[in-house]
Image: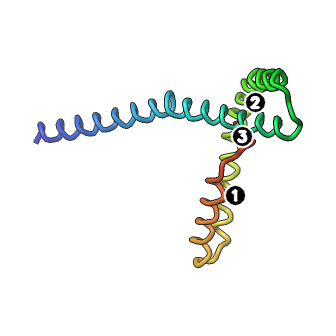
Amino acid sequence: MKHTVRAAIGALALIGMGFSLGVMADRLWFSTHTVAVAHDEVRGRLIGDLRETIHLSDDQVASVHEIFSRYQVIVTSAWDDLQPLLDGALDSAFAEINAVLDPDQVEPFHRWFARTHSLPRSLSP
């Protein structure tokens, strides 16, 4: 009996460590890489739109790209500070709205919420 309990605890510990390492890898590598790619894509679209709309020269494109790059650190820092507050407010609003819905309204609301919150946020870093 003692060996079975130890084996179960060991298995749970290994699963927990694997989960923790997976989350850590996601936070440190995958999320950072995805965010960096997203910043580059958004910046590229903005600069491309500016180039078409106001006919930027190549020198102006280079300058605007450098300006965006320089301020991205500030924008990212502000977004990182603000994001938990926004998430908390959205979660609270979601819970309160759920509380006032009729049972037949809950599932359509969840689908709407998932659809509207899966859209790319071009303004978010």
Give the image location of residue 44, x and y in percent: 71, 34
Give the image location of residue 48, x and y in percent: 76, 36
If you read the primary sequence from the N terminus, does the residue marked by circle 1 or circle 3 appear first? 1
Is 91 or 62 nearer to us in this picture?
Answer: 62
Q: Residue furthest right?
A: 54
Q: Which residue is mark 2?
A: 75
Is 31 or 84 nearer to us in this picture?
Answer: 31
| Point 63% across, 66% down: residue | 98
Image position of 69 with respect to 27: above or below: above
Circle 1 Cα neighbour tier, 10 Å, few/some/many (<14 / 14–19 / ≥20): few
Q: Which residue is mark 1?
A: 93
Image position of 20 with respect to 86: above or below: above
Q: Which residue is mark 3?
A: 124
Tell me the distance, in whole angstroms, between the alpha carbons under discs 2 and 1.
26 Å
Give the image location of residue 17, x and y in percent: 34, 32
Task: Say which element carries label 1.
Answer: helix
Circle 2 Cα neighbour tier, 10 Å, few/some/many (<14 / 14–19 / ≥20): some
Is 111 or 48 nearer to us in this picture?
Answer: 48
Is 113 or 38 nearer to us in this picture?
Answer: 38
Give the image location of residue 86, x and y in percent: 71, 45
Identify the amino acid type marked 3.
Ser
Circle 3 Cα neighbour tier, 10 Å, few/some/many (<14 / 14–19 / ≥20): few
Q: Which mark is residue 31?
A: none
Is disc 1 in contact with disc 3, using a CB cutoff of under 8 Å?
no
Identify the amino acid type marked 1.
Ala
Is disc 3 in contact with disc 2, using a CB cutoff of under 8 Å?
no
Q: Is residue 31 left or right of residue 74?
A: left
Tell me the distance, in whole angstroms, between the alpha carbons under discs 3 and 2.
9 Å
Quarter of the image for residue 33 reads top right
| Point 72% across, 39% down: residue | 45
Tell me the distance, in whole angstroms, between the alpha carbons under discs 1 and 3.
20 Å
